[in-house]
Amino acid sequence: MPCGGCTRLLPDPAFAQKNLSLLSLGWIKELQAINRTDRYIDLGSCVSLNGVLALPNIPALDPLKKALLTIGSASIRNRATLGGNICGRDSFGSAFPALSAMEATVELRSAAGTQWLSIHDLVGQDNLPAIPAGSFLDRVRVPLRDWEHNCIVRKGPGLLPGDTNITLTIVANIEKDAISEIHIVLTGRQLVRNRALEMRLTGKKLPLPAKESENCHHDFLESAVEAGLPAGQAIAVADSVRAFLVDLSGGAS
């Protein structure tokens, strides 16, 4: 099994019983590379989470950096890799919703060659993680597009991804006192994204009527419950969506 920092495997009490052979990719220089152009930044899959956080001020990376800061302690982030966080097979890591909202793409490598995919292609029809068999993540490409308004909300007791941890990412831009674009992504065991809600909000003049914020709260709550979130968590993330929209209305200019 290929691995980066192994921070998902080592805390697993069942790991020692699985008798797995691990292939460490963490020291391959190519997978640690960071390259930037005018339009995007490429992050190697074995760049550590702290390595991403240490990059100079790049406003386009703000949502991703906020997401990474919710993960474990500094020592865990120093060992954990971006690719490892993305490629969980039992649940989504906290970087995934940020990269989804930011419309990142990924390069996968296999014996057949390499291919570029939308990060959404790593989500199966059941909204569970679906990493293609026999492939490993080579690099992540993040568009250098600023999101003036963004927030990350993580809820759950654990330091590592799992069923009890969920992460909400919201990014939005405003033009001429209207929402020009908004993406709302929630991940835990499943990915939740209500694109109909996003389309409905796009183009809306600010401030939003209170009824509109309440309708969005209801719709996202419904999506979260349908995805199997416990009622308490579903209500909490729907509350966060509503709070973001209220703040967005107050920040319109």
Image (spheres, helix red, strand yellow):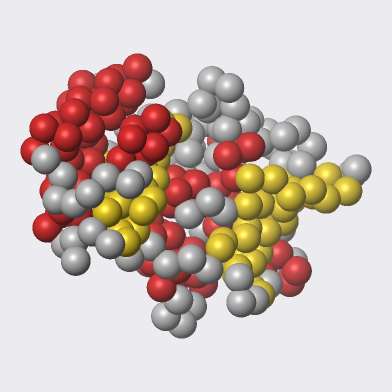
Which quadrant of the structure image shows residue 130? top right
Quarter-of-image position of residue 200: top left
219 relative position to 146: left or right: left
Q: Is residue 117 above or below residue 187?
A: below
Q: Can residue 98 be seen by looking at this rendering?
A: yes
- Residue 72, given in percent of the width and then of the height, sits at 36, 55
Q: Nearer the viewer, residue 156 or 148?
A: 148
Q: State the quadrant of the C terminus.
A: bottom left
Tally the marks: 0
Q: Tell me which residue sits at (33%, 23%) in the image.
A: 223
**Percent coordinates x, y for residue 21 in the rendering:** 73, 41
Which quadrant, please, contains the N terminus?
top right
Q: Nearer the viewer, residue 178 or 117?
A: 178
Residue closest to the far right: 112
Residue 241 lies in quadrant:
top left
Q: Image point 28% across, 29% down: which residue?
A: 220
User: Does residue 188 appear in this view?
Assistant: no
Provide residue 8's location: percent of width, then percent of height: 51, 45
**Which residue is farthest left?**
210
> Horizontally, is 143 left or right of 249 in the view?
right
Q: Residue at x 38, y 62 (%)?
A: 147
